[in-house]
């Protein structure tokens, strides 16, 4: 028997399949297997939530809320485990905003982020608008794996005042 979450996923993928005549979208089970992860029901369901909506950033808490909404019964601890497994398998990239806030990015390429304070949101920085220079040379026998820049932003504090003139 299928859980409501699986039914939801199946519907979603059938819809995707019918929308894309040339099926270049690899099946989630294949993706998980290729990443060296056993395609368990929970992993498939979470991968479906993560990867079927295009490029996105999410936290474990946000994914947990989405899973509940989709009828996927899964604990927050399981979500944390799955996210870390997906990260270790190279399917996700981890973005640490601070000690208590971690986001996961479905785009694993090297890029940087804005963090919107007060909205708990991560946005990509256009690669053309940032130039990282003056990096130190790494200690002997080491190489720079990647550079993660998080630029914190907030809404303008100035109120949208009366238009002058
Ligand atoms: Zn990103």
Image (tube, rainbow, N blue to C red):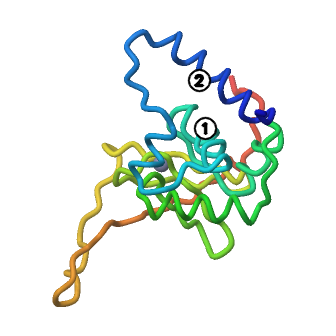
> Left or right of 4: which side holds 27?
left
4 and 112: which is toward the camera: 4
From the viewer's perspective, is residue 97 above or below residue 16? Answer: below
142 and 156: which is toward the camera: 142
* Residue annotated with mark 1: 48
Query: At numbered mark 1, what does the secondary structure look like: helix, strand or loop?
Result: helix
**x and y, in percent, of residue 32 in the image:** 48, 48
Q: Residue 131 — which label?
A: none
* Residue annotated with mark 2: 13
Residue 52 position by quadrant: top right
**x and y, in percent, of residue 100 in the image:** 68, 72
141 and 111: which is toward the camera: 141
Residue pictured at 72% horizontal, 26% vertical = 163
Residue pictured at 71% horizontal, 62% vertical = 78
**x and y, in percent, of residue 56 in the image:** 55, 41
Q: CA distance from mark 2 to mark 1?
A: 9 Å
Residue contact between numbered discs 2 and 1, judged by CB atoms under 8 Å: yes
Quadrant (top left, top right, bottom left, bottom right) of the N terminus: top right
Query: At numbered mark 2, what does the secondary structure look like: helix, strand or loop?
Result: helix
**x and y, in percent, of residue 63 in the image:** 70, 49
Give the class, few, some or many, for how many residues have Cα within 10 Å of label 1's Cα (few <14, many ≥20): many
From the viewer's perspective, is residue 6 above or below residue 131? Answer: above
Quadrant (top left, top right, bottom left, bottom right) of the C terminus: top right
Give the class, few, some or many, for how many residues have Cα within 10 Å of label 2's Cα (few <14, many ≥20): some
Residue pictured at 65% horizontal, 25% vertical = 10
Residue pictured at 76% horizontal, 44% vertical = 67
């Amino acid at each position: 028997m299928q859980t409501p979450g699986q039914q939801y996923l199946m519907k979603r993928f059938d819809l995707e399949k019918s929308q894309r005549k040339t099926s270049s979208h690899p099946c989630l089970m294949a993706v998980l297997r290729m990443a060296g992860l056993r395609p368990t029901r929970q992993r498939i369901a979470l991968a479906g939530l993560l990867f079927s909506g295009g490029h996105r950033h999410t936290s474990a808490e946000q994914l947990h809320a989405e899973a509940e909404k989709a009828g996927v019964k899964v604990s927050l601890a399981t979500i944390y485990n799955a996210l870390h497994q997906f990260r270790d398998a190279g399917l996700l990239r981890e973005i640490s905003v601070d000690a208590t806030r971690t986001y996961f990015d479905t785009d694993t390429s090297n890029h940087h982020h804005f963090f919107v304070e007060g909205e708990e949101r991560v946005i990509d920085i256009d690669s053309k608008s940032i130039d990282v220079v003056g990096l130190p040379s790494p200690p002997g026998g080491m190489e720079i794996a990647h550079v993660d820049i998080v630029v914190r932003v907030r809404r303008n504090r100035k109120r949208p005042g009366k238009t002058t003139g």
